[in-house]
Image (tube, helix red, strand yellow):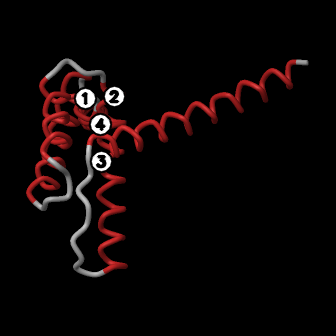
């Protein structure tokens, strides 16, 4: 290989490394992106009158306060699930006035998600324990 070919190869490797480094996002940036997505989704649902004001204020407080990324992701996923269920019910029922989603509904859905994840963890722990015997 000539000297120029070696330099071109090194340059290409450096470009690939830079691209990989750009893809890695700092945790603070990830959290801010989730907060932005969460408040935008909540605002869209409030404007379309799918959620009530108290739930919107609760989500605003989540985005303003120092909340963990896990909690933000759980809230965002729950809100997306609620949005899809509302859309599905509208498609089935047609343009009928539906009940707004409240904080109580949001908490119930969030707790269901936690119970499912806890149950899967318990099953995995039992399986590991049985395997160890």
Residue of label 2: 71
Distance in Å between CA atoms under marks 4 and 3: 37 Å
> Which label belongs to residue 93?
none
**For the residues bearing labels 2 and 1, Cβ distance under 8 angstroms:** no
Distance in Å between CA atoms under marks 1 and 4: 16 Å
Q: Is residue 112 above or below residue 85?
A: above
Q: Secondary structure at mark 2?
A: helix
Disc nearest the viewer among 2 and 1: 2
Residue of label 4: 16
Identify the image quadrant of the C terminus. top right
Q: Position of residue 30 (x, y in %)?
A: 24, 30
**Which numbered disc flags the more N-terminal residue, 1 or 4?**
4
Q: Position of residue 123 (x, y in %)?
A: 71, 32
- Who's the residue at 68% across and 28% down the image? 122
Front residue of this view, candidates 129 and 62: 62
Snapshot quadrant of residue 100? bottom left
Q: Is residue 98 above or below residue 12?
A: below
**For the residues bearing labels 1 and 3, Cβ distance under 8 angstroms:** no
Residue of label 3: 79
Number of other residues with Cα within 10 Å of mark 2, as a class: few under 14, some 14 to 19, many 20 or more: few
Front residue of this view, candidates 101 and 29: 101
**For the residues bearing labels 2 and 3, Cβ distance under 8 angstroms:** no
Q: Secondary structure at mark 1?
A: loop
Q: Position of residue 39 (x, y in %)?
A: 14, 41
Residue of label 1: 25
Identify the image quadrant of the N terminus. top left
Front residue of this view, candidates 84 and 20: 84
Disc nearest the viewer among 1 and 3: 3
- Who's the residue at 34% across and 28% down the image? 71
């Amino acid at each position: 290989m000539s000297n120029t070919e070696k330099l071109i190869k090194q340059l290409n490797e450096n470009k690939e490394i830079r691209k990989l480094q750009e893809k890695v996002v700092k945790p603070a940036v990830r959290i801010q992106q989730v907060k932005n997505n969460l408040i935008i989704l909540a605002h869209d649902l409030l404007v379309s009158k799918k959620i009530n004001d108290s739930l919107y204020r609760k989500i605003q407080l989540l985005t303003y306060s120092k909340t963990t990324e896990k909690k933000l992701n759980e809230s965002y996923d729950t809100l997306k699930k609620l949005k899809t269920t509302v859309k599905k019910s509208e498609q089935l029922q047609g343009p009928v006035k539906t009940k707004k989603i409240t904080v109580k509904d949001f908490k119930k859905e969030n707790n269901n998600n936690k119970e499912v994840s806890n149950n899967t963890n318990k099953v995995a722990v039992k399986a590991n324990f049985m395997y160890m015997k």
